Amino acid sequence: MDLNFSPEELAFRQEVRDFIDANLPPATRQHLIEGKGPTKEMVVEWQRILNKRGWAVPEWPVEWGGPGWSAAQRYIFREELQMAPAPSPLGFNVNMCGPVVIQFGTEEQKKRFLPRMANLDDWWCQGFSEPGAGSDLAGLKTRAVREGDEWVINGQKTWTTLAQHADWIFVLARTNPTAKKQEGISFILCDMKTPGITVRPIITIEGGHEVNEVFFDNVRVPAENLVGEENKGWDCAKFLLGNERFGQARVGASRERIRRLKVIAAQTLDGGEPLMADPEFRRQMTEIEVELKALEMTVMRVIAQDMKRRDGKPNPATSVLKIKGTEIQQGVSELLMKAAGPYAWVDGDPDAEGTNQWDVAPDWAYGLAGTYFNWRKQSIYGGSNEIQRNIMAKAFLGL
């Protein structure tokens, strides 16, 4: 198996890099270089720039706006975005709901929703997890009852990322309460402006507002918004989660953070010497770099396998990528915390007056503690790493 990129693929990488350099708004790039998450406005602006170029939905088929890239080209594109760094196209639209609508939706649903997803005219969020159904997603209790030409939804979703921005939500709801856990579930699209929907913020440990609770109180949704067959939503969910896990490897993002870490460690003094001179710190960083290279090779193997697959089903090997990708990202955040020392606890905007506890803190250190604590979730969301190991045991070992 040849895991090297071809000359054509290397030329494509340069094309992507040149486009990003020429078109990514400088303020957005600098915002991300400083380790801050992109604002909604930054994500929308950049995705529309990509969509105008025909690059906003790289995984979609050509007839629905995709560029017709190979799996290797899609990987290169993601990696270049992460290394720039630039905002990725909104995953809820591009990698989650969009592919489900393409795979399971009607022609009317595709024509109605897909162009608006690609151009980010509608911001989507994911209504999967519930207070009693996180990793055990099949235990969800939100109900949808058919009344004439409508579904009436009652229940609660939690950890709903960026629901405060969302125009639409894709909801897993139980439509047959007497069926087995994985059966009797349906996949329904719901306008967030529908009466009966309430969004309440969940403030996470670092003080950020990223996730929310979403309550459904007799929310009436047109029956035509059911995607796929009634009571077959679990097939949609498995398909969606397989796509989500592949993207969690984030090789490019980890490579960019390691590059940043090396610069910081070379400039930060510890006992009068650069932190990079500390043998233990170098050992830890080298260990993460080796793991990242191994992850990159594994991603390339999965891509090579997927290019030969014809069944359209997610590769169970994406569970490997999810586990190792999130562990590496957490490891890098730990080393950044070590480099920052007590300055990691300084928060606020370093350019705003009256927000800094210590004026001597370097700008790159602001908010690192918050990032460290926030990233503990990475090994939980998208199916916890423990669940991924169960999937691997079943798929690879037959246990």
Image (cartoon, rainbow, N blue to C red):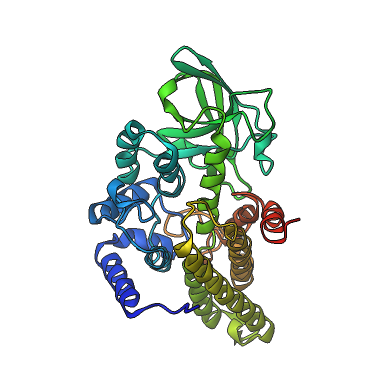
Give the side of residue 347 with respect to residue 106, left or right. Answer: right
Residue 395 point in image, percent of width and height: 66, 56
Quarter of the picture holding the C terminus: bottom right
Residue 203 sits in quarter: top right
* Residue occupying image coordinates x 62% and y 23%: 176
- Seen from the viewer's position, the closer of residues 208 and 140 is 140
Q: In this rendering, does residue 306 appear at all?
A: yes
- Seen from the viewer's position, the closer of residues 264 and 220 is 220
Residue 396 sits in quarter: bottom right
* Residue occupying image coordinates x 65% and y 32%: 140
Q: Residue furthest front?
A: 310
Residue 146 point in image, percent of width and height: 52, 16
- Seen from the viewer's position, the closer of residues 83 and 368 is 83
- Seen from the viewer's position, the closer of residues 61 and 120 is 61
Q: Residue furthest top?
A: 148
Q: In this rendering, does residue 362 appear at all?
A: no
- Image: 138 above or below 329: above
Residue 205 point in image, percent of width and height: 63, 48
Residue 62 point in image, percent of width and height: 29, 52
Give the side of residue 290 with respect to residue 194, left or right. Answer: right
- Image: 354 above or below 110: below
Give the side of residue 378 with respect to residue 10, left or right. Answer: right
What count of labels does the image hold?
A: 0
- Image: 265 above or below 208: below
* Residue occupying image coordinates x 36% and y 33%: 109
